Image (cartoon, rainbow, N blue to C red):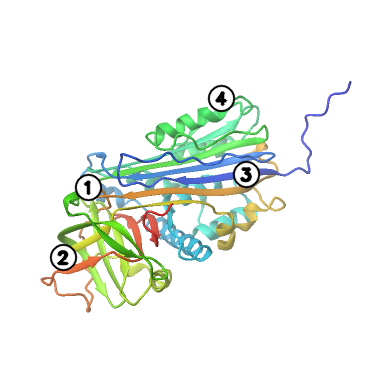
Amino acid sequence: MTRPSSVPNPQKKFRFLVYLSGLSRLRQRGTPAAKLPGKAGPALLTACLVLLTACGMKGEGISMEKRAQAAAALDPAVVKAQNAFGLKLHRQLVQEDKEKNVFLSPVSVSMALAMTYNGSAGETREAMSRTLGWEGWKPEQVNGGNRTMKELLEKSGKGIQLNIANSVWTKKGLTFSKSFLQTNREYYDAYVKELDFSKADAAPTINRWVKDKTNGKIPVIVDGLSPQDRMVLINAIYFKGTWKDEFSPSRTKEESFRLPGGSTVNVPMMARSGSYEYLEETGFQAIRLPYGEGQMDMLVILPGEGSSLEALHEKLWSDASPWQKTFETSRGEIRLPRFKLELDRKLNDSLTALGMGVAFDPRKAEFTELGEGSKGLYISQVKHKTYLKVDEQGTEAAAVTSVMKAGSAPPPNTPFTMVVNRPFFLAIEDRQTGAWLFTGSVYHPEEK
């Protein structure tokens, strides 16, 4: 009896599945495990991005001065490209699902796609470069910028823990480019491991790595691996921080939050009085709530009464720079919901709309820089999962380094009141680099 040939059909196309998964959380206790489907295609290269954010832990004790010196080594173009890409993707997600919560990490998405970019070639590489803002850049600039960003963010100082971990898992018996693997080792500190994907313990091995790197918050990212899977790439980001000035639970009261359409729901509204970076102009109020020693913060932008989050979005899409500058410090009261957000969605259409469609096309995608094992690969799926929890113990930090004066802002000795009781925008920022690590549009607090 003749055995069927094990040689693959040269016309067969192989899929490259990209998972972007993120959990963002502003407190340690009570975070549910996040699980992503791991369904694979006929032959699969999988890139998984795991993102966690939380509040409460202490990070490496680096001084603000030393961190500022390290930040000077980061090419500003890297931050500018990352922020611009993040806002483009955020805008696309908002347009696809009107009046639905959005929360994503530009850092996580761009860093994982950068690892994937190292295996691309030709039109696919050009499309990825245009979409991610790297057009005209050499790979060394892309990779070097991400390495500096990773090293800097992991030195976040007291009150903040931010860990970024990358890994590349290759199918046993296949040959991949040593240059590709070494680049991801050198620039992304990636853990590279060959696995027998046909074994039952292959997926659990990957999941154990993810569980360890996310402090147990995401125990499963890959449900299973098919015999055709070629490679799994994972980016895991774990963030946890405490407010520089915590909210007192005794001041948290039930208040109404106005939903799109005019209906209201009751939410636990936290309250605190103090001095904050604050900006008020026609159509919005904005405040920075610091984490740790002020090296990171949560920027909250609230549309004015009579305006809308959609109108605010249009200002952001047009020019976000006014909100990326330092505001004047004012004293007042901030009332902010205790809330959580979740996002679990496929990004194929979003990235295609932003110009990356060729990477998803089995007839045109080029990932030949991955080596011999890359023939026929294309991206089958990009999935992003995030979870954010904000409570009395945590949100981000701001440090005053310069002042932007706004003529319509209230005088410094006139206390402000900012009640976040309607849809709003937020960004978690690194103050010394200007990077927006996470961005969100909150229409429905507590919505799953």
Q: Amino acid at mark 2?
A: Gly
Q: Amino acid at mark 1?
A: Gly
Residue 201, label in figure: 4
Lower sequence index among marks 3 and 2: 3
Few, some or many residues within 10 Å of mark 2 (<14, 14–19, 20+): some
Q: Is residue 39 left or right of residue 317?
A: right
Alpha-carbon span between mark 3 and mark 2: 51 Å
> In 3D space, how far apart are the residues under numbered discs 3 and 4 (Cα atoms)?
21 Å
Nearer to me, 190 or 354: 354
The image shows residue 249 at horizontal and vertical percentages of 19, 49
Marks 4 and 2, how far apart at CA? 56 Å
Q: Which residue is mark 2?
A: 332
Front residue of 243 and 178 = 243
Label 4 to label 1: alpha-carbon separation:
40 Å
Mark 4 is on which residue type? Asp
Quadrant where the N terminus is found in the figure: top right
Q: Callout 4 environment at 10 Å: few (<14), some (14 to 19), or many (20+)?
A: some
Label 3, on which residue? 16
